[in-house]
Image: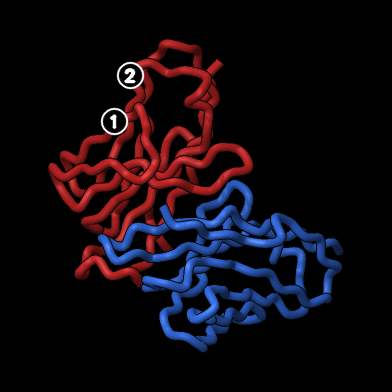
Chain colours: A blue, B red
Amino acid sequence: ILNVEQSPQSLHVQEGDSTNFTCSFPSSNFYALHWYRWETAKSPEALFVMTLNGDEKKKGRISATLNTKEGYSYLYIKGSQPEDSATYLCALGGAAGNKLTFGGGTRVLVKP
Amino acid sequence: EADIYQTPRYLVIGTGKKITLECSQTMGHDKMYWYQQDPGMELHLIHYSYGVNSTEKGDLSSESTVSRIRTEHFPLTLESARPSHTSQYLCASSEVAGSRPTDTQYFGPGTRLTVL
């Protein structure tokens, strides 16, 4: 089983501040990295899928970068808002049948 | 927006009861999945299906069973619930489309199961 790690496990951010957190994964046999946002009592929602080293994706105030050579991805939130409060999950897409291997998530709480 | 539904959302049940967690999707996706998340832990794949009459076990061993008689429906059953089954169960689906690592999975809201 692949080991996907996310850090920190949780963080508190003041409204308006920017923040970022990390997803680490084995750099060998990399196929794809997914980011999901999971708000309390809702379904996990897909944010990004990245495949190429150096990939950068952006959706509103949220962006992500990918370094497949060293095995990490950063997710950035610019100017955090209370509605950004959620658990952010990263997952590796594998070669066999697009099964996803998830990290433990980073729980973000944006304080007004 | 994804149309994938799970019922019940919350279930508290006694030891030894048989339970079925329902999952339905209206997107016509061939692939469906069940994930289990214990408190404070990662999501782990416990079952998946490539289509009707296809079921496979996932990476995490589970005492639950699944069936896929219709494309849109992928129920999970526990024949005799135990406290160790207390967890959150999430259902997901994706298009087959060659089963690429980049294929997005669409998730339901989950069922939070507590076995007393």
Residue in view at x 21 percent, y 69 percent:
B97
Q: Secondary structure at mark 1?
A: strand
- The residue that mark 1 highlights is B65
Residue at 52% x, 33% y is: B87
Quadrant that contains the N terminus of chain B: bottom left
Task: Quote the CA–CA distance across marks 1 and 2.
Answer: 8 Å
Q: In the image shown, does B103 or B42 lie closer to the viewer?
A: B42
Q: Are marks 1 and 2 in contact (CB under 8 Å)?
A: yes
Q: Is residue B114 above or below residue A49?
A: above
* Residue A66 percent coordinates (x, y): 53, 80
| Residue in the picture at 35% in, 72% down | B102
Is residue B39 left or right of B95 when viewed as pictured?
right
Residue B20 lies, in percent from the top left, at 35, 27
Q: Nearer the viewer, residue A57 or B107?
A: A57
Write the residue at 53% across / 64% down.
A90
Mark 1 or 2 closer to N-term?
A: 1
Residue B92 percent across, percent down from the top left: 37, 52
Quick one: label 1, few (<14), some, or many (20+) residues within 10 Å?
some
Above or below: residue B98 compared with residue B115: below
Q: Where is mark 2, residue-wise?
A: B79
> In screen coordinates, is A56 left or right of A51?
right
Residue A38 occupies which quadrant of the picture? bottom right
- Which chain is disc 1 placed on? B
Residue type at mark 1 is Thr
Q: Amino acid at mark 2?
A: Glu
